[in-house]
Amino acid sequence: MFDPEEIRRDFPILERTVNGRRIVYFDNAASTQKPVQVLRAMEEFMKKHYANVHRGLHTLSQEASQKYEEAHEIVAKFISAYSWREVIFVSNTTEAINTIAYGWGLWNLREGDEIVVTIMDHHSNMLPWRLIANLKGARVKYIDITNDGYLQYEKIGEIITEKTRIVAFPLASNVLGTINDARKITKVAHEVGAIVVADGAQSVPHVPTNVRELEVDFLAFSGHKMLGPTGIGVLWGREDVLEEMKPFKVGGDTIKDVTLNTVVWHDLPWRFEAGTPNIVEAVGLAEAINYITRIGIENIREHEVELVAYTLKRLEELSDEVEYYGPRNPQHKTGVIAFNIKELNHHTVGASLDLFGIAVRTGMHCAHPLHYRLGLKGTVRASYYLYNTFEEIDYFIDSLEKIIMLKEKFKKEIPAEVCTGT
């Protein structure tokens, strides 16, 4: 059975106190906490098996190489890839998307071509395409959203045209939590021969992901948002597309042979993993995925839907003072709630919540165009994961009520201009 209280025992940091209160960690969309199983797996590897990979015939190098390659297989199975050869380890989602932009876009885009992204995209799935468009003389177009936070699917057929070469979009919004209909977008994109890039940073850790069913050409996501360490992310691509793509970074381990005049690139996925990779972090990511698999990604998804439904119900009690954004249907969202308290700056609210030991994110969440589209200068974002509980939500709502009651006091004691950043 799925038991958040049992799960919480695997996360020592959740026992910590902040400002005299036991921490309530609601910043999971930014990064998740790590279970002891992941920490132990990384420590065990460094203590007993560590060596560089693919560079030695000695025992330690062979053991390290095996564990590193097994990590590719574990990821491939988790997302239902056709082969582990399609799984490329990068440092994070941002590097994955830049790898596609410079490895595929730079070599295939021509002047006058079009790239389609969305208003709700994270900067990491928007700015690389804008840079490539500037380099190649291409044009970037945007799919807008409805006022309640859904993509305007009825306009996709007008925006994606015969000139479209790339369509990039988030599987889920990091601000609104909106889960997008990938197959609707992919169908239209493939009809005009466009490549489809899915940003899965906010989706893969929370929603069952099958790349065969999504029918995308590329998928990017990060390890640290799914109980793994920082410094490790995944670029999945269809094998036939990857075979035609140029390496973005080149050097050690990317080649089979080099002369002064020629180079023979390595097989997949190694040609895209230049230099000594993040070996220890790959071991940690593999264990994080094993942990999620043991609990069940479907169970995690169901738990988050229930948490969101409960939160939205509780927020209705504060509707005169609190505005929240995005879909109202919990089934259409990940565990993300973006909101503001009227007349209080979002940074002030975040700093105030910290006084209660509640960790949230404030600002524009690396999605400035989306906030401008909503007419907002920023939001407070609470985001959940498998170890969060209904009791924590009750405490969160109670804390918001206290902040509202003491609104004028918090305005004076925590001025917004002190709380900088985005």
Image (tube, grey):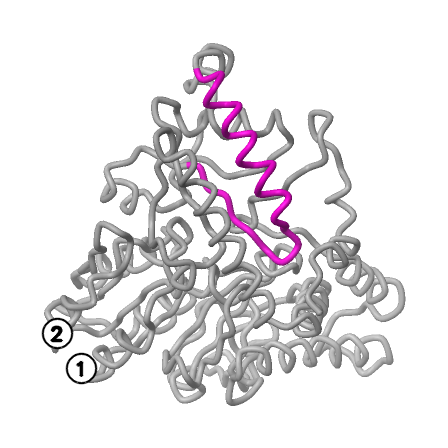
Can residue 397 be found in the magenta stretch? yes
Assign the C terminus to one quadrant of the image.
Answer: top left
Assign the N terminus to one quadrant of the image.
Answer: bottom right
Compared to 178, does 416 lie above or below? above
Compared to 341, does 59 lie above or below? below
Which region of the structure is painted magenta? 380-407
Residue indicated by mark 1: 192
* Position in image of residue 149 (x %, y %): 29, 53
Compared to 265, does 166 lie above or below? above
Can residue 250 be found in the magenta stretch? no
Residue indicated by mark 2: 161
Identify which residue is drawn at 56% across, 36% down: 396
At label 1, the amino acid type is Val
Nearest the viewer among 311 and 21 is 311
Question: Looking at the image, which residue sits at the far front?
Answer: 317
* Position in image of residue 231 (x %, y %): 61, 57
Left or right: 195, with 29 as reference point:
left
Compared to 271, does 125 lie above or below? above
- In the figure, residue 322 lies in which quadrant? top left
* Mark 1 surroundings: few (<14), some (14-19) or many (≥20) residues within 10 A: some
Q: Do callouts 2 and 1 mark residues in contact (Cβ within 8 Å)?
A: yes
Left or right: 19, with 165 as reference point:
right
Identify which residue is drawn at 59% across, 65% down: 300
Q: Main secondary structure of the magenta part?
A: helix
